[in-house]
Image (spheres, rainbow, N blue to C red):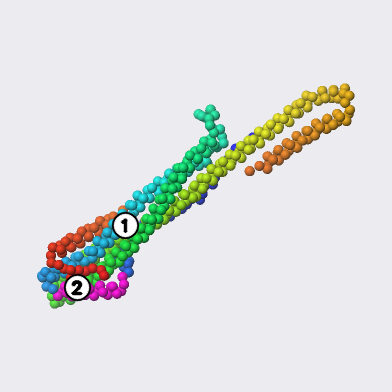
Amino acid sequence: MASDPTLTVEAPAALTLTPPDPVPVVQAEKAAGLVPVDDSKKTELETRVDQFVADLVAQDPNSPEFGRRVDAITAMGAKEIRDAAGQSNRFLDRPVRAMDQEGGVGKDLAELRRVVEDLDPGKRGNLTAPQKLFGIIPFGNKMRNYFDGYKSSQTHISSILKSLASGKDELLMDNAAIDTERANLWTAMGRLEQMIHLSRAMDAKLEDKANELDHTDPAKAKAIRETALFYTRQRTQDLLTQMAVTVQGYLALDLVKKNNVELVKGVDRASTTTVAALRTAVTVAQALTNQKLVLEQITQLNTTTANIIDSTGRLLKENTARVHEQAASSTIPLETLQRAFQNIYDTMDAIDTFKLKALDSMKTTVNTLGNEVEKSRGYIARAEGAAQAQLKGPSSDQFRLEAL
């Protein structure tokens, strides 16, 4: 009897999905200068600072006019911080939304993997072996049951692949939306960078003026340091912190985009290679089963042939004496008897040749970002408070400091 063929299906090479590196924490002091500002805009901003400081120094430190100009400093960059914070909050929402949307893709991939593993013929053992109930009573056919299960799973697999294609389209549209949001955030970072340059220029200018006034008007120098210079540096810190948060949000969204690209690659692989590998495994299992059935038929045929030859030999042995006895007493011509024996010899030779051919035939068969946002919200709240206080007092539109 021929031995049962062993089903061996090579698994496809593993797909390597490379996750991008985590978003680094951007320090506030390193956030400035990340977005370039034109030299012409820098010059115009510095001119505004010179005019503002000259006007501030000309006022009496105890006058309302001096206080209104200090209030303008406390509100410096408030609009830019609010705009950038709004953009950052949308960016922070993006990873959460992406996670919710990609939950469907991840679920579909897991379901497809479960179905493929269930249909893996290599995990079903010997599909050609007889199936027995309780290991004793012959019951059903393993191969027929396997292919019935494969046919019934085709609709499920098609549904999963359709859902994966829909999820892939969502990921691609998500990345297109991310590109648009990054462009908007880049503009907001540019305005923040202008305000950082303006606040630093004002810091340097106020400190120089205070040093000059130490010799001529110490009281005014003290007032400038305690109010204007203090609030200028405070606003500079606020602007730098918001810039760090915004830059980190910009990098975080780039991380989400890269993750989406890797997920699209995984969906493509699951929709093509994985399903193709399953179909190949099923085809090989079916082919090997057919080969085994043919081998079994050949073996049975050879057994039958051997039985015929053995039976013929026994008949010849039993009838030999009778034949010789009949030959001795027979009136049949000798030539006729010789032809009869020759026919027997030819039959035996044909049987031997058949056996040799049969043998030859057998022989040839083969979580840091959230804290920064909370901190920026505190700065925004303080900026809003200053703005509200400014609304209650005299109008200071002429002292408003904004980006170009």
In the rendered structure, which segment of residues is drawn in magenta? 37-58
Disc 2 target residue: 52
Label 1 secondary element? helix
- Who's the residue at 67% across and 34% down the image? 301
Disc 1 residue crowd, few under 14, some 14–19, many 20+, Cα 10 Å: many
Q: Is residue 305 left or right of residue 324?
A: left
Label 2 secondary element? helix
Seen from the viewer's position, the closer of residues 33 and 306 is: 306
Q: Is residue 169 above or below residue 238?
A: above
Find the residue positioned furthest to the bottom.
216
Does the magenta segment cover residue 152? no
Residue 115, horizontal then vertical, whole percent: 46, 42
- Who's the residue at 34% across and 54% down the image? 95
Does the magenta segment cover residue 51? yes
Mark in the foreground, 1 or 2: 1
Disc 1 target residue: 91
Mark 1 or mark 2, earlier in chain: 2
For the question of whether residue 87 can be seen, the reply is yes
Residue 304, horizontal then vertical, whole percent: 69, 31
Task: Give the amino acid type for the residue marked by disc 1 in the picture.
Answer: Phe
> What label does residue 10 carry, if any?
none
